Every structure is written in structure tokens, then in C-alpha cells.
Amino acid sequence: MDTPPRSVTAKVFDFPRNAWYAAAWDHEVSARTPLARTIAGVPMAMWRSTDGAVSVLADACWHRLAPLSMGTIHGDELQCPYHGLRYNPAGRCTSMPAQRTVNPSAAVPSFPVVERHRYVWVWPGDPDLADPDLVPDMHQMEHPDWAGDGLTIAAGCNYQLVLDNLMDLTHEEFVHSSSIGQDELSESEFEVTRDGDRRVTVSRWMRDIDPPPFWLKNMRDKFPGFSGKVDRWQIIHYEAPGTICIDVGVAKAGTGAPEGDRSQGVNGYVMNTITPESARTSHYFWAFMRNYRLDSQLITTQLREGVHGVFAEDEEMLVAQQRAIDANPDHAFYSLNIDAGGMWVRRILDEMLALEGRGNDADAAVTALRPAANG
């Protein structure tokens, strides 16, 4: 692989602002208490109005910058906890204490918001560019053919480190050896494709292999007493800026799964969307959805807790990696062939930053990456 420009191999990657980011699970935002959350470096206050709609304002009062998230909800409005100024969902101040007139300049920024796929999505950048059609596709989260649940990780690392982790799953062989790791992960071929200016796919098949413990358990949930070889797949779908949905599963070996017949197997989607909080912290929302035994809450809970344990191993590694990055500011990242998917993600993010006037030499970046794109 040629050496890409430093902008693409940055160890602490900047984040685009003209993008939808998952800010919260839908159940986290209520009409009782405002929710404080920092999205892409911007502190925000969120709440539900009486009609259930979600509103998001900058978390600082126009008057003295008191955090509005410490305030109270009154119908559709949010009241500052310090001196009682009230704001409507558009951020306009509607009342001030001890005076009949409201200063016409009294306002705080409001942010476009969309509820979709069980998440509240916020656009921290230019509101005129906030197209709801650009919310990443995570339809399995609310489709009747799928069941599952997830959690949030407060990840103590730059968001790009999480994206790197998810775009190259060969790390499972070493980090998750007791659950989903196996030698065939790094021995098998993979294919990387880019679709338009927002999507990258990495596909890997492992045929006629022993199922690792996690997948053997899932096979036995659907096929009691199962034993034998399986065909295993991992198809990683990235959508900018921070969403990665991974089509994963195993099927009885030789029953046609690679050709499209997955009826003799179990299929899941690992849903991940990573939102930068700061340069070194991230909100990592994840869920595991499956398309079998949909009515079993036991399996839903077992899978959620099992994946939670796997991701705890990732979190430990990512936080340690961030510490090492900060301790070695002059050390450059190097890339292997297994990093091809992650490097295309960095390329896309670099392009998005360039469109915001914060990027670098994107043309040079793609030229450098082309030799690695064939996996």
C-alpha cells in the first residue's frame, strides 16, 4: 500500500458537522426532565414537548450561559434554571423575569432533529443542509422481521478508532478469542467496495469451518443439538459519517448460504452508530438484531448481554489505544491490507471535512488508497 497523506492516517480524526448523528435512544428523551448531551463538540439540551416532538437547543442560556439542561419543561418550552428565561423549540426567548418586553435578540441556537430507527438524530452543522433522507439506514432496528436490543458505550477514545475497529474484524481472532474469534478470520479473503460518496462495504466468507462458541450457541437456539461445520459470513456496511451495520451469521456448511439461501442458518445484524462527543470521547450506540425466534425475550436478553461482554473487550482495547496515542504524539499510523475498509472510511470523512473547509488533499488520498481497495 502506498503511504496516504497524513490527513487520512490522522490518529485523532476531526469530525464533520454537516451530518446526522445519533444523540440518544428514543426512550432517553422525555417530557419530564431535559437531557444534556454533547454532540460533535456542541453541548445540547433535549426534551419532548406535550405532543411528543423532540426539540434540541444549545445548552447555554442567552442571558448568563447557565445550562438549560438543568432547567424545567413547561409544555413546549424550556425554562432556564438560573433566572427563569423561557425558550420555545425554535430557541426564541418567550419570557423574561421582571420585565414585560422581551429583547428581540434573545435566542439560542436550535438544531434540526429526526426520530428514526429508535434513535434521536441531531444535525449540529448548517441547518439549511439537514436533509432527513440522509439519516443512515438502520431499518432492522424497527422492522417486524427483526428483534433485538442494545446499549450505549461511553467510549473514551476518538470516534475514528471505533470505526477502524468495526471495519476490520480480523481483530476478533485476538481480542475475542473466547467468543467469536477464530483463525479463519485472518486467513480468509475479503472484498472492499465503495458505493457513491457515503458508503463502503467489506465482505468476507469463511467456508466449512467450526463455529466459534457464540455462533454455536445461536445455531443451537434455532437447531437444537446442532453440531458440525458451518459457512460463516461478515458483510460490513458503512454509511457516513459514523454508522456501521454488520450482516453476520453462520449456516450449515454447503447448504447454499454464499449463494443466497440462508434458511439453514442464523442471521444477525450488529447495528453500530458512533457519535463524536469530543476529540477523545464518543457515544457508541449499538444493538444486535436477529431474524429468528423473534418472540423469545430470553434470546434477546442473552444476545444483548453476550454482545455487551464482547464489546467491553473492544472498549478496553480502544481506551488503551487512545492512551498510547496521547503518549506518543510523534508516532505515525501505518496501514496494512486489512485496513483497506477503514482507510476508505477515512477518505470519505476527509472529503466531508474538505466540503466544510476543514479537509485536506482528498485527491491525493484516493490515489494513494487505490492499490489497497481490492483487499
Image (spheres, rainbow, N blue to C red):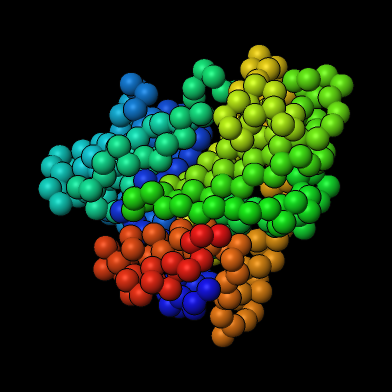
- Write down the quadrant of residue 114 in the picture: top left
Q: Residue at (48%, 68%) from the top-left corner?
A: 371
On the image, the x and y values in percent for residue 346 come to 45, 63
Q: Residue at (59%, 83%) from the top-left corner?
A: 331
109 relative position to 210: left or right:
left
Q: Residue at (61%, 47%) from the top-left corner?
A: 204
Q: Nearer the viewer, residue 252 or 267?
A: 252
The C terminus sits in image quarter: bottom right
For residue 69, say whether it is visible: no
On the image, the x and y values in percent for residue 95 come to 22, 39
171 relative position to 29: left or right:
right
On the image, the x and y values in percent for residue 291 come to 61, 23
For residue 372, say whether it is visible: yes
Q: Nearer the viewer, residue 58 or 117?
A: 117
170 relative position to 23: left or right:
right
Placement of 292 over or under 375, stated as above or below? above
Image label count: 0
Q: Nearer the viewer, residue 26 or 224?
A: 224
Placement of 173 over or under 24, stated as above or below? below
Placement of 327 over or under 147, stated as above or below? below
Placement of 39 over or under 292, stated as above or below? below
Name of the residue lying farthest toward the top: 295
